[in-house]
Image (cartoon, rainbow, N blue to C red):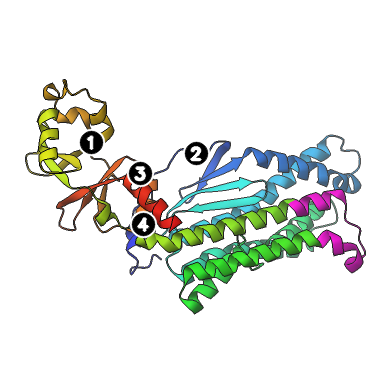
């Protein structure tokens, strides 16, 4: 259930944005889009080819159908990956977070959740439920394999069990960007009270895991007596690179987020002049200059805001035309997401802007009074100054 003490828990879900390029929507779970990338087709083909010899041993003479059977196994395997990701998404929704999409790709899956976790226990449960789901699927498949007669189906279920158990256990490795890294982050965050320090610790865990993975082909033969193949080396390199870059990105984001609390909308707001919609633009600009206002908002007769005058549109309008053009001609009508609380700050501010991209936003007080207009150009300058400071 959503936590009633969290203000964001009552927020409506973010509007769906455009689908990322290179993805295909195949359905939805609990209102969440399920997407696949073009790389999924590649990995499904590789699984099909890799599983085909095992199928040939169990059921000779299938010919090209052994590759079809291998592809079916790839689909079933990724359905279990989808269960892993869906568990993340559903728990996040239950805790009051918006979930944009679930994407299946070359290395597994990804669940896009709006914003960072607000509490350590949220981070913990959203993260740990995925590996636990994979382990549960693996355990059920392993148990079922003892009840099914020898043959192709049993081989497929045994492989499904092994894959899910490996996925579940490996995802519990305590290093970002793995789920285990998020579990470690939650534990350190809960113990220290510092989310950013916890992310750095979990990020270093991910880097160490990446280095250990890259070293594995060098020690594999002495330790277990099996010489690594070229495919083993390539796979280890890809996974190690994935872990290292993911951990490094998480650490960089943590350093930026540490400075986000200093990003506050109120002091960045421009003084605002309110004018009726039918006022000539030239007169509106003259009044704004006289009042030393950096923005103009049009209002209805009852005083409610109707739109924000676009600075870019005013600049583009020739001065000799301004006396003959109503200010409404260069005004962007107020729409959902263009009005923000005057006290919005930090990550909440960045998230609000990313949900509804625009050049200007209207800042309003809790009683509905207009405080000012926030320009994304001003936010961007302040963000870069904070990140570099």
* Residue 217 horizontal/vertical position (percent): 84, 59
Whether residue 270 is situated above or below residue 123 in the rendered picture? above
Residue 206, image quadrant: bottom right
**Position of residue 177 measured from the top left corner of the image (x, y, whole percent):** 60, 59
Magenta portion: prevailing SS class: helix
Mark 1 / mark 3, whichever is N-terminal: 1
Q: Is residue 221 magenta?
A: yes
Q: Report the residue marked by disc 1.
A: 333
Question: Which mark sits nearer the N-terminus, 4 or 3?
Answer: 4
What is the secondary structure assignment of the residue under circle 1? Answer: strand
* Cα–Cα gap, marks 4 and 1: 23 Å
Answer with mark 2 or mark 3, whichever residue precedes in sequence: 2
Q: Judging from the image, what secondary structure is the residue with disc 3 in?
A: loop
The residue identified by callout 4 is 348
Q: Nearer the viewer, residue 107 or 26?
A: 107
In front here: 346 or 94? 346
| Numbered circle sitting on residue 356 | 3
Q: Position of residue 204 (x, y in %)?
A: 62, 66
Instruction: Left or right? Give the position of 2 relative to 180.
Output: left
The residue carrying mark 2 is: 19
Residue 232 colored magenta? yes
């Amino acid at each position: 259930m959503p936590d009633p003490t969290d203000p964001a828990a009552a927020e409506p879900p973010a509007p769906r944005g455009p689908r990322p390029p290179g993805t295909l929507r195949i359905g939805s779970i609990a209102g969440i889009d399920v997407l696949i990338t073009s790389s999924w087709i590649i990995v499904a083909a590789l699984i099909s080819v890799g599983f085909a010899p095992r199928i040939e041993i169990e059921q000779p003479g299938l010919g090209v159908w052994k590759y079809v059977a291998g592809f079916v196994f790839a689909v079933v395997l990724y359905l279990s990956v989808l269960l892993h990701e869906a568990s993340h998404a559903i728990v996040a929704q239950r805790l009051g977070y918006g979930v944009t999409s679930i994407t299946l790709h070359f290395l597994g899956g990804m669940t896009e959740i709006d914003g960072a976790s607000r509490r350590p226990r949220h981070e913990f449960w959203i993260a740990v439920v995925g590996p636990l789901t994979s382990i549960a699927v693996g355990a059920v498949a392993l148990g079922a394999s003892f009840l099914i007669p020898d043959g192709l189906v049993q081989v497929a279920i045994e492989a499904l069990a092994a894959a899910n158990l490996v996925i579940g256990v490996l995802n519990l490795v305590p290093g970002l960007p793995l789920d285990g890294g998020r579990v470690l982050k939650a534990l350190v965050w809960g113990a220290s009270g510092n989310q950013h320090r916890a992310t750095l610790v979990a990020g270093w865990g991910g880097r160490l895991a990446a280095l250990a993975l890259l070293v594995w082909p060098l020690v594999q033969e002495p330790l277990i007596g099996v010489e690594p193949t070229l495919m083993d080396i390539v796979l280890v390199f890809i996974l190690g690179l994935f872990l290292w870059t993911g951990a490094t990105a998480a650490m960089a984001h943590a350093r930026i987020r540490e400075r986000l609390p200093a990003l506050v909308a109120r002091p960045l707001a421009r003084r605002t002049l309110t004018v009726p919609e039918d006022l000539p633009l030239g007169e509106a600009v003259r009044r704004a200059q006289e009042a030393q206002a950096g923005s103009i908002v049009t209002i209805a007769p009852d005083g409610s805001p109707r739109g924000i005058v676009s600075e870019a549109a005013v600049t583009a309008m020739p001065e000799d035309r301004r006396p003959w053009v109503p200010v409404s001609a260069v005004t962007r009508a107020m729409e959902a997401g263009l009005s923000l609380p005057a006290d919005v700050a930090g990550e909440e501010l960045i998230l609000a802007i990313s949900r509804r991209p625009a050049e200007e936003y209207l800042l309003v007080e809790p009683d509905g009074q207009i405080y000012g207009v926030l320009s994304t150009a001003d936010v961007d300058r302040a963000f870069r100054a904070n990140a570099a400071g």
